[in-house]
Image (cartoon, helix red, strand yellow):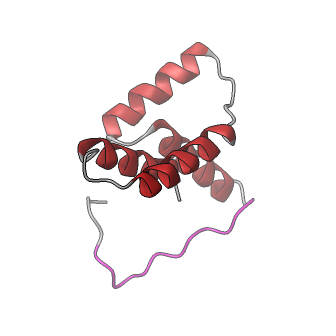
């Protein structure tokens, strides 16, 4: 489970708090606690953090998602990871 899916489940549970069972709520809270316990941040310079936040907001994605995209593309560009193959027959959004 990702942090995003757990957050969505918690928000859903909050919306229907009268209908959720104690056991289901307990499971959700334990998952959330586990995720919080395992989160480690990467210290960044304020200028870098501001730039990432601005770009993430502009792209309408989370900051951690943006960092994953940037890191993966850097690793591919510098040959630390194989470049992902694009299926020629698949439709893509956007333009080249």
Q: Nearer the viewer, residue 33 or 26?
A: 26
Q: Which residues are magenta?
A: 80-91
Which residue shows up at 38% across the image and 52% down it?
9
The extreme top residue here reads: 46
Q: Could you say where residue 39 lies in the image, as x and y percent from the top left?
A: 65, 39
- Mainly helix, strand or loop, the magenta region? loop
Q: Is residue 82 magenta?
A: yes
Q: Quadrant of the C terminus?
A: bottom left
Q: Could you say where residue 7 lies in the image, as x and y percent from the top left?
A: 42, 45
Q: Nearer the viewer, residue 39 or 41?
A: 39
Which residue shows up at 59% across the image and 41% down it?
33
**Up/down of 48 relative to 78, above or below:** above
Residue 48, picture quadrant = top right
**Up/down of 96 relative to 45, above or below:** below
Q: Could you say where residue 79 lies in the image, as x and y percent from the top left?
A: 72, 60
Q: Nearer the viewer, residue 51 or 34?
A: 34
Which residue shows up at 61% across the image and 54% down it?
72
Which residue shows up at 50% across the image and 50% down it?
26
**Up/down of 1 relative to 62, above or below:** below
Label count reads 0
């Amino acid at each position: 489970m990702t942090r995003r899916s757990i957050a969505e489940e918690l928000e859903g549970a909050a919306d229907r708090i009268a209908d959720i069972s104690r056991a289901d709520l307990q499971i959700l809270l334990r998952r959330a606690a586990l995720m919080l316990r395992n989160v480690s941040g990467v210290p960044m310079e304020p200028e870098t953090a501001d730039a990432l936040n601005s770009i993430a907001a502009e792209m309408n994605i989370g900051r951690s998602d943006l960092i994953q995209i940037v890191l993966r593309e850097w690793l591919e560009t510098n040959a630390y990871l194989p470049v992902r193959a694009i299926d020629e027959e698949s439709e893509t959004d956007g333009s080249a």
